[in-house]
Each structure stands twice: as structure tokens, then as C-alpha cells.
């Protein structure tokens, strides 16, 4: 009696290769389904550009030099559709170049929130979080706007963000 055994060390046999292609196609399809649509990304980008202009058009000199930039998954182009609900998260930084590290973080954060409240539309969408201000675009996305200032202890362009509960500046841990 002859017993045949399958050689499991063979790599790249036709059936194995075909299965790999099928799995790759399936994974590609899943990734496409998870990606934000082009119109979702464009809508969020348009919103945060308008918010950035609103903040920098303030009569306060501290806000006039504000730079708004995306960070996190939106900046990296890796944002996904949420598993539950429709809203996705857009993380933004409102970098305030004119504010020194000696400024009170609570006051600086409030400065950004007060400016957002001056806009009738934003007032109804605004929610305060620990380190940021959230604008809720119901059923679409929300913009998390974190104020930041230059970190004088960092020579590589580091930034500080306010911590509401600790009432102090914290080094920013993320960057695109």
C-alpha cells in the first residue's frame, strides 16, 4: 500500500497562488468599502478651511496668525468610515504662533472657543472637550479643533496643547 503525502513546503503552486489572488482582491474590496468617499473628504476639508479662515479673521491679534492644519488619519489619508453611525472624526490643530508659553492654557483654549461661539452657525454645533473644541456636523463628521502654541523646549517644531482638567500645557504627542 502506497501512502501519498502532500508536500506542504511547496510555495507558489498554482492553487496556492490563485487563493492568494482571491484573498488580495477581497482585501482590496474591503479596504475600498472602508475608505471615505472623495466627496466626504472634500466636504470635511472645505469645512475646516472655512473654520480656519473664521478663526484667523478675528480682530484679536492672537488669532490672526492662526494656522489650521489637519493631523492624524485625515492628514495621513488613512481615515475610515465609522463602523457604527455615519460620523467620522477630523482632527485639526489651531496653531497660535503669537501666544507665548507663559500664557494660561485655560484662557488660550477659551479664546478659540469664544471666537467659534461668535459665529451663529458654529455656536449651535460647538462642544467643549478636554483639549479641543468639537464642531458637530450632524450625521456627517465632526471637527476636533485643538489649540496649540510653540513649545520653546523643543527645537524640532514641537507644540503644546492645553489640558482643561490639569489646567496646564501638555506636549503634543501626535503629528502628521
Image (cartoon, helix red, strand yellow):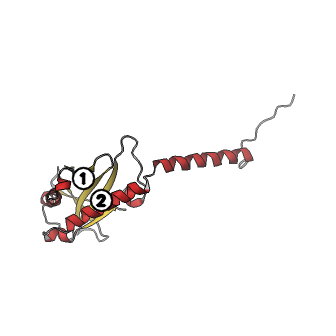
Residue 127 placement (x, y as % from top left): 20, 49
Residue for point 14% across, 71% down: 61
Disc 1, disc 2: CB below 8 Å? yes
Question: With 176 as the anchor, is 151 left or right in this view?
Answer: left
Residue linked to disc 2: 47
Question: Which image quarter: residue 116?
Answer: bottom left
- Answer above or below: position of 8 versus 175: above
Question: With 61 as the anchor, is 86 left or right in this view?
Answer: right
In this rendering, does residue 50 appear at all? Answer: yes
Question: With 23 as the anchor, is 31 left or right in this view?
Answer: left
Residue for point 78% across, 36% down: 5
Q: Secondary structure at mark 1?
A: strand
> How many numbered marks are there?
2
Q: Nearer the viewer, residue 65 or 150?
A: 65
Residue linked to disc 1: 135
Residue 10 placement (x, y as % from top left): 73, 46
In this rendering, does residue 99 appear at all? Answer: no
Which quadrant: the C terminus? bottom left
Amino acid at each position: 500500500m502506497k501512502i501519498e503525502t502532500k508536500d506542504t513546503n511547496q510555495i507558489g503552486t498554482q492553487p496556492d497562488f490563485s487563493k492568494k489572488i482571491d484573498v488580495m482582491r477581497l482585501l482590496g474590496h474591503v479596504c475600498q468599502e472602508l475608505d471615505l468617499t472623495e466627496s466626504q473628504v472634500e466636504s470635511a476639508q472645505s469645512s475646516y478651511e472655512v473654520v480656519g479662515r473664521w478663526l484667523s479673521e478675528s480682530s484679536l491679534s492672537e488669532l490672526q496668525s492662526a494656522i489650521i492644519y489637519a493631523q492624524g488619519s485625515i492628514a495621513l489619508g488613512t481615515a475610515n468610515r465609522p463602523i457604527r453611525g455615519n460620523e467620522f472624526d477630523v482632527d485639526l490643530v489651531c496653531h497660535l504662533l503669537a501666544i507665548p508659553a507663559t500664557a494660561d492654557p485655560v484662557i488660550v483654549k477659551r479664546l478659540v472657543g469664544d471666537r467659534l461661539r461668535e459665529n451663529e452657525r458654529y455656536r449651535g454645533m460647538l462642544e467643549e472637550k478636554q483639549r479641543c473644541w468639537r464642531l458637530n456636523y450632524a450625521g456627517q463628521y465632526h471637527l476636533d479643533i485643538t489649540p496649540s502654541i510653540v513649545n520653546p523646549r523643543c527645537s524640532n517644531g514641537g507644540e503644546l496643547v492645553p489640558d482643561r482638567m490639569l489646567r496646564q500645557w501638555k506636549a503634543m504627542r501626535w503629528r502628521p
